[in-house]
Structure formats: structure tokens, C-alpha cells
Amino acid sequence: MSENTINLTLEVWRQNGPTEKGRFETYEAKGISPDASFLEMLDEVNERLIDDDKVPVTFESDCREGICGTCSLMINGQAHGPNKGQSTCQLHMRTFSDGDHITIEPFRATSFPIIKDLAVSRAAMDTIQQAGGYISVTTGSAPDANMIPVPKPAADLAMDAAACIGCGACVAACPNSAAQLFTSAKIQQFNLLPQGQPERWKRTEAMVDTMEDFFGTCTNHGECFEACPKEISLDFIAFMNRDYVKAKVKNRNLSGQKS
């Protein structure tokens, strides 16, 4: 082994499809630079598998900058690995030591069916977004952004919520496979701003009701926050719950007026 490299043993989950039986397979990752990212290490392993005429490990990635949320892996039982506030692609091999055994699995949740190996479908989270995670009210020509007064505390909170990258780590880490942290962030990034007020109650009820069709119920374990690479605050769940109760009353009253 070079003085500047490490050797690792990987236990990697392999599964040919959602209906196939999966299993762990062992691979040696030799001569890995401590400065390599976790995904770069997997790239090297896959290149060696291809050279040996073996099927490479399927995993997802895109930006590799902690923005897109697709690099979702369970590493030694932790979503995105051992470092807090980082996604898998931001995890570097200097976190590990020479000779370490690393177990790599896909996110484990019924709502995230496995596509192949380490890749899962997070379409259920897209369904929540489609239920109301947008602003659709027509306001005519767009005004200059500086003409809309937004209190700084509200703007800061909305930006904190908008930091959610939708990776699903909160679901994977939750004992109940709940998606309250994700859903609350996607709701509050609009509900906190003036532009989001016209559809606030419709948005809240639709997104929460859709969430409950796919995911478990929150019981305040707090594992979602610990696993979140963007450290989305648990406060947003409280804000969502408050708005949901109000939405049920307001939307019922609006429905009664129409009838």
C-alpha cells in the first residue's frame, strides 16, 4: 500500500430489480486516495469490476456538490455516512482508516422501492411536490423583486427551508419512514413568503394529505434532523402541523361558502 492510499473492504448490497432477491457482495477497494470522495471511490471499484468483465454497482449521482440529493446511500447504517451536515458525495475517504470494513446499502423504506442495487425510486416525494409545492396564482406581469416587502426573518426562514435537496435521508433514518421534515420544508419555503399566501391553506392540506398516503407518521424521534445533509430544522414540522390544523378549518369554511 502506498503511504498516501488506503485499502478497504466493502460489503455492497446487490439487487437486480425491485422484485428480485438481494444479497451483499464483498469487494476490495485498494489504493484509494484519502482525498477521493466516496462516490469517486465507488467509481474506481466499478472501473475494476468492468475490467474484470463483471457487472458494476448501480448507484445514483448527478451534481456531486451536495445540491441535487440523488447520492443517497446508507453507509455503515447511517444515511449519507458518519459526517453530520453532508451528503454522500461530500463524504471523503479520509473519514475512514486503512483496513476498514464499510457496509453500503440503499435507503431502506417501503416508500422507496429499489430500482437496482443502491438506486431507489423516490417518486413518492415527487408526488408530494406535485400536490402543491409550487405557486400557481396568476399575478400579471412579474413585479420587480425588490418591490415586494418581505420581512428579513421570514426570508431567512424560507431560505433555510428551501435548502432541502429532497434526498430522502430523513425518511431512511426515521424508524417510521416518515417524511414530515421533507414535506414541511417544501411547504414552508412558500408559506413563509407573501407570494405563497394565496394558496397557503390549499397547499398545506394537499401536500400533507398526499404525504400520508405514502409515508409513516412522525413520533418525534428527531433522527430526520440528525441525518439531514442540510440540517433542516425540526421547527418546520411544528410550523406545518400548525398550518395543517388551520388549513382544515379554513378550507372547510371555503368549501361551505361555495356550496
Image (cartoon, grey):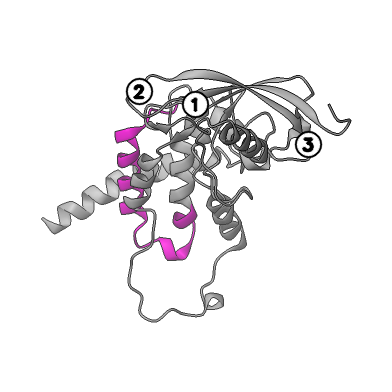
Task: Please give the residue where the numbered disc 3 appears in the rendered image.
Answer: 33
Give how far across and how far down residue 191 sits, in percent. 44, 55
Q: Quadrant of the N terminus?
A: top right
Residue 87 visible in the current orientation = no
Task: Please give the residue where the numbered disc 2 appears in the rendered image.
Answer: 20
Image mark for residue 174: 1
Find numbered disc 3 in the image and state the secondary structure of the residue it sits on: loop
Q: Is residue 14 left or right of residue 203?
A: right
Counting residues from the start of the chain, the first of labels 1 and 3 encountered is 3
**Three-letter residue code for mark 1:** Cys
Residues 188 and 163: in front is 163
Give how far across and how far down residue 17 sits, in percent. 37, 29
* Residue at image coords 53%, 53%: 162
Find numbered disc 2 in the image and state the secondary structure of the residue it sits on: loop
What is the residue that sits farthest to the right in this orientation? Answer: 3
What is the magenta range? 189-218
Residues 22 and 142: in front is 22
Give how far across and how far down residue 173 sits, in percent. 52, 27
Whether residue 134 is situated above or below residue 232 in the rendered picture = below
How far is the residue under mark 2 from the one under mark 1? 25 Å
Give how far across and how far down residue 75 sits, in percent. 61, 27
Whether residue 148 is situated above or below residue 88 in the rendered picture = below
* Residue at image coords 57%, 60%: 155
Counting residues from the start of the chain, the first of labels 2 and 3 encountered is 2
Q: Is residue 34 left or right of residue 198?
A: right
How far is the residue under mark 2 from the one under mark 3? 34 Å
Q: Quadrant of residue 142?
A: bottom left
Q: Residues within 10 Å of mark 3 (few under 14, many from 20)?
A: some
**Three-letter residue code for mark 3:** Ser
